[in-house]
Image (spheres, grey):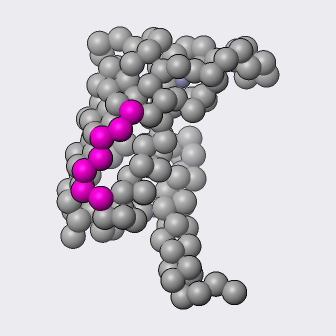
Amino acid sequence: MNSYNNMRKSDIRKSALDFFNEGEGIGKKVTFKEAFPEIQELNIEIIESGKGVGEWNEKGTYTLDFPPAEFIDCSNKLCFKGGLRIADIIHEMAINKTEHCEKCESCFGNETSPKGSKIYKKCLNSFEVKVDIKYK
Ligand SMILES: [Zn+2]
């Protein structure tokens, strides 16, 4: 049996999962603000390095009014469905009420054959992430 605390936690998790599941950008279930109602101000800087990163796509900045998608696409053209799960980081911070976070995450994708059937190696692109959040 779940304790009351566990129940609450899974409720929070569920609303954020809805956000993660918004998928390919269609059929959005909740907006970013609805998924994270406790966030008052948000500032995110993401610097990607690795294959396929040009000056125009090296750095991304996001705010509450211009929030990131569930995940940031990897620029490596050989990488299959890779990127950075930025929503996971924000979710983790929101649960712990963390105000500042700087980390370097590697891409979760793999370099594969064009349709993704053969995996050649792990994608080595990485993302430097800086997040500042103010809570209500
Ligand atoms: Zn990648």
Residue plotted at (34% across, 20% down): 57
Write down the quadrant of residue 93 in the picture: bottom left
How many numbered marks are there? Answer: 0
Estimate the x, y position of residue 99 in percent, counting from the top left. Answer: 24, 56
SS assignment for the magenta stretch, majority: strand
Q: Quadrant of the C terminus?
A: bottom left
Image vertical order of residue 109 relative to residue 115, above or below: below
Residue 100 image position (x, y, % from top left) = 25, 50
- Whether residue 104 appears in this view of the structure is yes
- Of residues 64 and 51, the one nearer the viewer is 51
Q: Is residue 63 visible?
A: no
- Is residue 70 shown left or right of residue 119? left
Q: Residue at x 56, y 79 (%)?
A: 6
Above or below residue 99? Residue 47 is above
Residue at 79 percent across and 22 percent down: it is: 117
128 horizontally vs 117: left or right:
left
Expressed as whole percent of the image width and height from the top left, the position of residue 76 reads 51, 16
Vertical arrangement, residue 94 with respect to residue 54, above or below: below
* Quarter of the image where the N terminus is located: bottom right
Image coords of residue 115 (percent x, y):
73, 20
Q: Quadrant of ligand 1?
A: top right
Residue 121, image quadrant? top right
| Residue lying at 40% horizontally and 65% vertically, measured from the top left | 95
- Which quadrant of the figure has residue 49? top left
**Does 61 sit above or below residue 2?**
above
Which span is picked out in magenta? 98-104
Is residue 71 one of those drawn in magenta? no
